[in-house]
Amino acid sequence: MVSAPGSRVEALLEGQLLTREIDRGTFIERAANLGLPAPAIGDAADKFMAIAANQAARRATLRSSYDYIVIGSGASGSVVARRLAENQDAQVLLLEAGGGDLKPGILITETWFFNQGGEFDWNFAAERSPSVNNRSITQAMVQEARRLGVALHLDCGVERVLASGSNADGSARVTGLLLADGREITATRIAANINPKLLFTRLIEGSLLPEDFRSRIQRFRCESATFRMNVALSELPQFNGMPGSGAHLGAGIIIAPSLDFMDRAYLSARAEGTSRSPIVEMLIPSTIDDSLAPPGAHVASLFCQHFRYELPDGRRWQDERDAAAERIIDTVNAHAPNFRRSILGRLVLSPLDLEERFGLLGGDIFHGALGLDQLWAARPLLGFGDYRTPLRRLYMCGSGTHPGGGVTAVPGLNAAREILKDHRSGSI
């Protein structure tokens, strides 16, 4: 399927927004491969260069010092930044990484396009007109944070959390961040909306942490046994039980026909590492927001269980990824027979891919397993369930803290309360 020229120009433009190395000539070449008329290509290239220049100007405004830095955006990160900014006269930086261990998260919209030859590409766009959906919630939060003076910077990979003092006498405290490009930013306080294990084992010098804490955080369990797949579709799925279009296609569609089916999916994953017939939850957001796909086409996301991060018998996800994706497609196709033939392209994310691309250790979408020993006051560790850390003025505010995963923003709300409490009391 080939969309109208205007739609294809827009999709191409959105697809390149985060690809800083692409210049005008390369953009024009890629647009020409889509078979676009010359005037449309020229206009799109001008618009692309203007957006790229605007984003470069934003990066250039990064200050060298802030009162607060929030690492990682998402719902909780945005809430923390907004609450800090509205409660006091402070310089707040909301930092979203685009490389290294930290990758773009919930603020980033996934868009796709394909050329005349049917070649599929999947990219990430950081700016587009919001619609009334989950994406617009976080965009609205960002707009409010900016209104309050919060600086928001994307594509800022964090290399290291900087600190001074000593763990021996309890004087260790954060002083700022070292970015992947070599820049240093100082800060009075830092809030981290990332997996606690990632924070303390990869971004902080181990000697700054108590030995007992280092040992315990190493044992913090991270795995949610999930496999994700995003697909571009030429048509909507036609389900045997409810053929045709309707409101059901705009809801969450869970393929798990019985308790026995779910039990088999779990047991086969325990024995073999992957489910033979996985549980699949499908969302088709383009039924709600038609800007996500060209007219008549759709995009769908598949949330699938169970798939272990570590496969038995020395098997590797690099070798198993496509076979797992095929089993997922077979599972959906058994209930919607047109599904396989409607797939124009797919983005497959095994648990290992989720770790490598998005910093989700163990492929854990909740920043830590939600077991009884890692909940409430023990999330992430007993003694550190109040969003504070062994490093003074470093706080945690993401899903790895109480009450855990899910788009609630409650961890961020709670963390902001504790940060402001410390600031007002001068206790830390």
Image: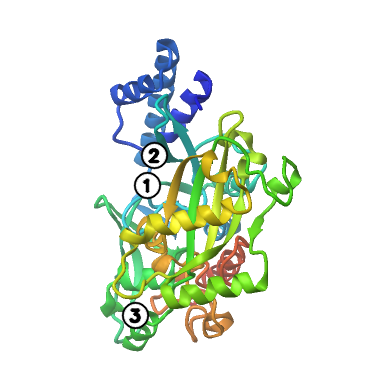
**SS state under label 1:** loop
Q: Quadrant of residue 140?
A: top right
Residue 266: x and y in percent read: 53, 74
Report the residue that reaches farthest toward the bottom.
212
Amino acid, disc 2 = Leu
Q: Residue at x 69, y 46 (%)?
A: 249
Q: For residue 171, which numbered disc appears in the image?
A: 3
Marker disc for residue 364: none
What SS does tag 3 mark? loop
**For mark 2, what is the residue?**
18
Alpha carbon separation for disc pair 1 and 3: 32 Å
Q: Which residue is mark 1?
A: 155
Q: Are marks 1 and 2 in contact (CB under 8 Å)?
A: yes
- Among the 4 quarters of the image, the one containing residue 103: bottom left
Q: Is residue 399 left or right of residue 121?
A: right
Q: Is residue 54 left or right of residue 89?
A: left
